[in-house]
Image (cartoon, rainbow, N blue to C red):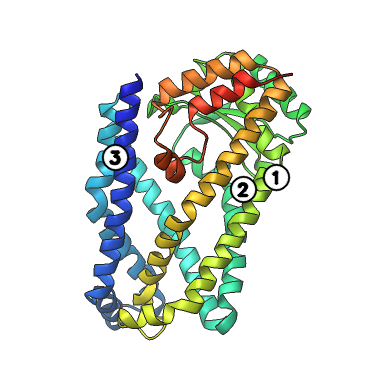
Amino acid sequence: MYNKAKEYSSIKYAFNILGVIYTLILLFLFLRLGASKSLSLWLTNYVPAFLILPAYLILISSGYYFLEFPFNFYQSYILEHKFLLSTQSLKSWFNDQLKAGVISYIIGLILITTFYFILHNFSDKWWLVFSAFWIFFSIILAKIMPVIIIPLFFKYKKLTDEALRERIMNLAKKMKVKLIDCFEIDFSKKTLKANATFVGVGGTRRVILADTLKDKYSHDEIEVILAHEFAHYRLKHLLKLIIVNSFSTLVIFYLIFKTSGPVLSFFGFSSLSEIGALPVAFIYFIIFGIIMQPLEAYLSRSFERSADREALKVTGLKDAFISMMNKLADQNLADRNPHPIIKFFFFDHPPIDERIKIGKRAQF
């Protein structure tokens, strides 16, 4: 199992790295060869003004999807079946791809349309105004995700195990977490991996258990998993992440505002307001994401360790925590002990072996 997990993880890391490089190359060529400018000019001549941006976005999104399809198909379908982690049919996979594409397009269109509106109306302060909108929109997405987006991909129902539900609700009360209810989703229709999460904002806050976890883990193990999720809320990790992400958003848009002039000129544009220059912003986001990823991963690992310790402290379920971690590692083919460089760049959770050590050292 250990060697199988290492092989699976190594392939995933390699594809993540290659995918980023490949995307940067595509964006660079699309801009440098003048294809983006030509496409925007062609649309300007043949499409009504109010449809230029939607048409441009759907064309470049579709083009990118087809150019990136071999990577995507291998990584999300072939690889998952090769390692016996997926139960999803090809038809179901394509349906999910279509739904994800439509959702991404709608979200992207809202953000980019707002971006150009703010860019045209707020001049030198556009980066500040749009950052505020971006943050607000992210919170709205977090609120609607459990009630609109997740049900598009999984069947959703209230948790039928009443004893487990009562235990979770009591745990939430003990940890001062306001929870509307507990739900389960049919993960097993698509994957054999296990997952549990605490999602939503305000009136949509809820626990969601995958059936692949609910049916294979003891109540003690599930309780300590959810105690970890509730600990993030209790320790205000979510608020801290919002602050960090808000600051990062301000920084990236300010950098675009201050430094994009020479970059735009290099690609043959005079202003960021030109629709054909949009991929320049995408390049900024990718490069900034590469730079920020180790820092964000380090911060996330720190929060995860704190949440593990808090979960153990609240529940006292040391043995259940250790057995749960071993089960998750085997079921999800997790890399228990990655190379330090891999951990530095890719791991937003401590590796499983480190988390088990936290469990073994826990004292009550």
Which amino acid is tagged 1?
A: Gly
Q: Which residue is mark 3?
A: 75
Q: Is residue 37 above or below residue 177?
A: below
Please name the residue that numbered disc 1 is placed on. Answer: 202
- Name the residue located 49 percent from the left edge and 65 percent from the top edge: 111
Q: Is residue 185 visible in this depiction of the protein?
A: no
Of labels 2 and 3, the one closer to you: 3
Mark 1 and mark 2 in contact (Cβ < 8 Å)? yes
Kind of residue sitting beneath label 2: Lys
Counting the numbered discs, the total is 3
Q: Residues within 10 Å of mark 3 (few under 14, many from 20)?
A: some
**Type of amino acid at the residue the image marks with label 3:** Gln
- Which mark is first along the chain, 1 or 2? 2
Q: What residue is shown at x 37% (from left), y 51% (from top)?
A: 101
For the view shown, which residue lies furthest in the bottom direction? 270
| Res. 160 mark | none
Instruction: Write down the quadrant of residue 77 in the picture.
Output: top left
